[in-house]
Image (tube, rainbow, N blue to C red):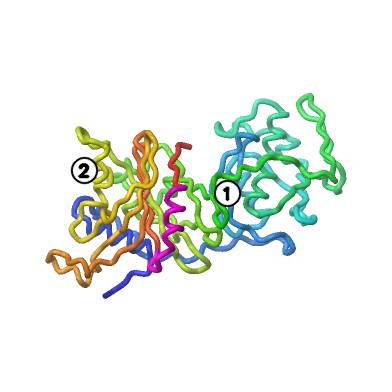
């Protein structure tokens, strides 16, 4: 029996074999395994702790919001990604310097900390005065470095290493160089051995055409999910159309561990939500195929007023065995999977794991952690 080692290939095979929702003919399937993304250049911070791949945290405490962060990056790149996300100029006077279990950070004169907010500001990160800007910047940088780089403390200093003192917008600010900056870093709901990730969907625009534009042109949302602390999340090298759409990949080292994508749906009319007909209507693109289906051992795990998450298996008959005859049970290739829908946002997320089965308790823990939320 032919086995597909790429989870993205499994997703593509499932979509291609589905009789109800084939991908548009003018688009290739997303069918190749993903190699690791190019590593960002590393600053000279070799003694800093290794990154545990947490999210960026942006905004102002206690309302910091998590955002995806490219994995494997150093402190300087974390600040750069935060700058791109928020629109703030976060130019540093020098790369962050290791200091005990933490990092020392100093900003350049042209940074928004001293020069003020950008014009125009991004709506999501709009600040109202100098005080709001200063604390939003320091909260975001400190929390993101702790989240992504695993440091326990962040110190903000002047360029010469002395106390950070300045005036802006009628406010006077003093941050002692010898005192770590205090900010409450959101820990999410991840339990020991897991890290909470936030994944934005649509994850990219690759594969978008006029025919499938309505799938891409939705208000963005985020999937929050606990993954084993040895896993990382990456975008694929080839951003092609598939069902589920805009899949991202989970890796354990160099080994592909899983994949997650999304799709849209309409609420099945006149069908009781407690029946199998309802969830099959929600997931019709991936459940109603005769040679591929996610409707194997569908088991609800958690439920709210607007969402339901379930474990299941994603199964398919390999192409060289799909001879047009009814499939027998022993022909099916099965992958552990998780499905979750949100009736407020009218989107669902489909997650399939790799060829090697993960422990049952791990499967359950990941499923119970799933949350679909608006951005």
Corner quadrant of residue 193: bottom right
Residue 367 at x, y percent in the picture: 42, 51
Residue 15 visible from this viewpoint: yes
Residue 250 at x, y percent in the picture: 46, 59
Circle 1 is placed at which residue position? 55
Side (left or right) of 276 relative to 150: left
Corner quadrant of residue 83: top right
* Residue count near mark 2 (Cα–Cα under 10 Å), binned few <14, some 14–19, many ≥20: some
Residue 29 visible from this viewpoint: no
Q: Residue furthest front?
A: 361
- The residue nearer to you, when weighing 272 against 12, is 272
Task: Please identify the quadrant where the N terminus is shown.
Answer: bottom left
Checking the image for residue 268, the label placed there is: none
**Residue ID at (64%, 61%):** 41
Residue stretch rendered in magenta on the structure: 354-369
Residue 357 at x, y percent in the picture: 40, 66
Q: Earlier in the sequence, mark 1 or mark 2?
A: 1
Residue 59 at x, y percent in the picture: 62, 36
Side (left or right) of 224 relative to 319: right
Query: Distance between the Cα atoms at labels 1 and 2?
Result: 37 Å
Checking the image for residue 277, the label placed there is: 2
- The residue nearer to you, when weighing 358 against 230, is 358
């Amino acid at each position: 029996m032919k086995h597909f080692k790429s989870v993205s290939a499994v997703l593509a095979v499932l979509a291609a074999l589905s009789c109800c929702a084939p991908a548009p003919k003018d688009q290739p399937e997303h069918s190749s395994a993903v190699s690791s993304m190019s590593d960002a250049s590393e600053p000279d911070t070799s003694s800093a702790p290794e990154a545990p791949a947490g999210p960026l945290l942006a905004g102002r405490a206690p309302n910091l919001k998590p955002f995806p962060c490219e994995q494997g990056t150093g402190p300087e790149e974390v600040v750069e990604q935060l700058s791109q996300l928020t629109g703030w100029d976060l130019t540093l006077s020098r790369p962050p310097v290791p200091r005990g279990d933490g990092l020392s950070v100093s900003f350049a004169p042209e940074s928004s900390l001293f020069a003020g907010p950008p014009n125009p500001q991004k709506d999501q990160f709009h600040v109202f005065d100098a005080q709001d800007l200063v604390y939003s910047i320091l909260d975001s940088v400190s929390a993101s470095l702790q989240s992504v780089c695993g440091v326990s403390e962040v110190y903000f200093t002047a360029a010469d290493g002395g106390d950070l003192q300045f005036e802006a917008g009628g406010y006077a600010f003093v941050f002692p160089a010898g005192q770590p900056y205090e900010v409450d870093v959101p820990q999410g709901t991840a339990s020991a051995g897991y890290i909470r990730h936030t994944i934005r969907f649509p994850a990219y625009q690759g594969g978008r055409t006029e025919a499938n534009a309505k799938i891409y042109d939705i208000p963005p949302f985020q999937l929050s999910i606990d993954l084993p602390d040895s896993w990382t999340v990456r975008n694929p090298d080839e951003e092609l159309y598939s069902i589920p759409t805009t899949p991202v990949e989970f890796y354990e080292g160099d080994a592909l561990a899983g994949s997650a994508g999304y799709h849209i749906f309409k609420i099945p009319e006149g069908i009781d939500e407690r029946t199998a007909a309802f969830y099959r209507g929600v997931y019709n693109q991936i459940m109603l195929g005769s040679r591929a289906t996610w409707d194997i051992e569908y088991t609800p795990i958690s439920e709210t007023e607007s969402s339901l998450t379930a474990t299941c298996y994603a199964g398919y008959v390999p192409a060289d065995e799909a001879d047009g005859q009814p499939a027998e049970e022993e022909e099916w290739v099965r992958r552990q999977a998780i499905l979750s829908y949100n009736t407020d946002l009218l989107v669902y997320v489909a997650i399939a794991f790799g060829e090697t089965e993960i422990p049952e308790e791990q499967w359950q823990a990941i499923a119970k952690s799933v949350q679909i939320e608006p951005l």
